[in-house]
Amino acid sequence: MVQTRAQVRASLNQQHQQQLTTNSEDTKKKGNTEKKAPQKASQHQLGPANQKALRSIETIDASLPSPVRQSFEPQSAHRQLEDEGSSAPDQPNNRGYIQQAISEDELDNDDDPVTYWARTGHWPLNRATDKPKMTLIYAKKKPSRSDNKRAASPISVQTSSETKSASYEKDAYEDRLNEKGSFMKDAESGIAPESDAVISDLLSSDQIVPQNTLFQDHIFEKTYEMVRSRNEVRVTRDITPLIVPSAETLAIHGADNLECLIESTNEPWSNSFPFTATQPKPDYSVGFTRSAFTDDQLKKLFPFIGNTLVGDQSYLMATYRMYFPFLTCEAKCSSGCLETADRQNAHSMTLAVRGVFELFDHVGREKEVDRQILAFSISHNHRYVRIYGHYPVIQGGKVKYYRHLIRGFDFISNSEEKWTAYRFTMNVYHRWMPSHLKRICSAVDELPLLSNVDLATIPEEPPQQPSMASTMDTTMDTTMDSTPGTSSTKPRRASKRQRKDA
């Protein structure tokens, strides 16, 4: 049970009184006959360390809203901070607590969280128990740039696909993912039997395919010849919709059950806590929109997502509109490399799986998602398709993320496969997504409902969009980092050179 501030003070006073008694007995044993005046344990007579702890407790406790103070309870999350360099370590989260890793020799199994905090000055993020390591998952404000004088805007500067995928083209990027706990392979334990059954269902269940498309039998070969030597944009325009259909387009055409979904195209996931130094920017991604959740659920989620419109970062968000992403697609042209697309998808889906895992871990139900496929990705070019499932595995007190190859094929040499990815994606939308949303909502329902959260304060739409002139000005004043696109964008101030007189 979490102790109140008064209980912490009383506990420290009691400890101090016991210490005084012990000192007195030691003095008597040494033959010290000098009489000591009785000492009254009070806050003013505490040792310097304990006084500092009490002052810290009062300062932090006073900074929290009353409902937060009453409802806060340290929760577990089976992971270490994943990227201390890119996620602004040792910065207060939205409740005022510092998120930082601690070493094993600082741990004490006998300490309850409040006593530990009073002793060390921070909450016990890691516990030397048989449970995985812990942290908090509340949202926090995105670190501001000293040279960024303009207010944050959800509008992003677009870059070419060649530039944005630069960092992923290097084999070393996979090593970087491995270092952070994400692996582009199956775990030794593999996926859970339930997920194996789900995959079989998604591959075998039939779906109606569209008519009058570029995949019609009599023009299929012409389609291939038309796009095989074109760039990635052309492949994305002509082929991707027939590999991964648009969820929003399907909803507009009558699939009412998909209205809870929202998609993004080439949009940076700027509202997600970074996993590596690059930022995901999938060619296409799908997640849940605000309308997928009830008003009470949105209130419960608010401390974990913050104000997304001003750049607050969260484990649960991708873009400022997308909750819990679960599908990404990366396309390449003939001169591109599917390995690059695979790395992009692996990065994006690590963040997606991480969000669901952190939520379930926070409510003490992490075992329910262990080895369960929580997201899918598709990599393709003008003729090859790879379909993957992504899942978390709890190993040795930590969570790691893995990838399972569901299907890989050449739909040109075997034309019978040309609709395989389309049918699979449709089944993800119609057969898998509803149960996934239900699973997420069941965990959200267990979060505390803060009484002082006004639903009207939860951002729904961005502020008034800047004019075309101001947008062009922003574009001209910023350039993109060398690790962009389907993945990473880092705007920086462009250098201005003095024009020399002729």
Image (spheres, rainbow, N blue to C red):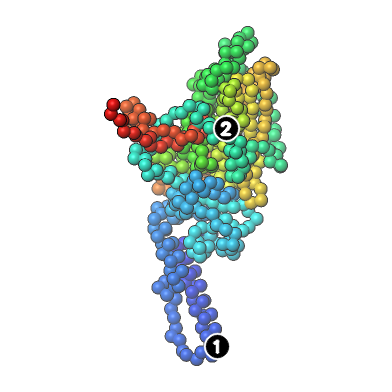
Is any part of residue 327 visible from this angle? no
Q: Which residue is mark 2?
A: 169
* Residue 456 percent across, percent down from the top left: 38, 39
Is any part of residue 333 visible from this angle? yes
User: Relative to residue 491, is residue 24 depicted above or below?
Assistant: below
* Residue 182 percent across, percent down from the top left: 61, 41
Q: Farthest residue in the front direction?
A: 502
Residue depicted at 58% across the width and 30% down the height: 341
Residue depicted at 49% across the width and 59% down the height: 122
Q: Could you tell me which quadrant the C terminus lies in?
A: top left
Amino acid type for the residue under numbered disc 1 = Lys
Question: Between residues 318 and 382, which one lies in front from this camera angle?
Answer: 382
Q: Is residue 187 left or right of residue 331?
A: right
* Residue 339 quadrant: top right
Q: Secondary structure at mark 2?
A: helix
Q: Which residue is mark 1?
A: 30
**Circle 1 crowding by C-alpha within 10 Å: few under 14, some 14–19, many from 20:** few
Question: Between residues 153 and 113, which one lies in front from this camera angle?
Answer: 153
Q: Is residue 337 left or right of residue 296?
A: right
Residue depicted at 59% across the width and 31% down the height: 340
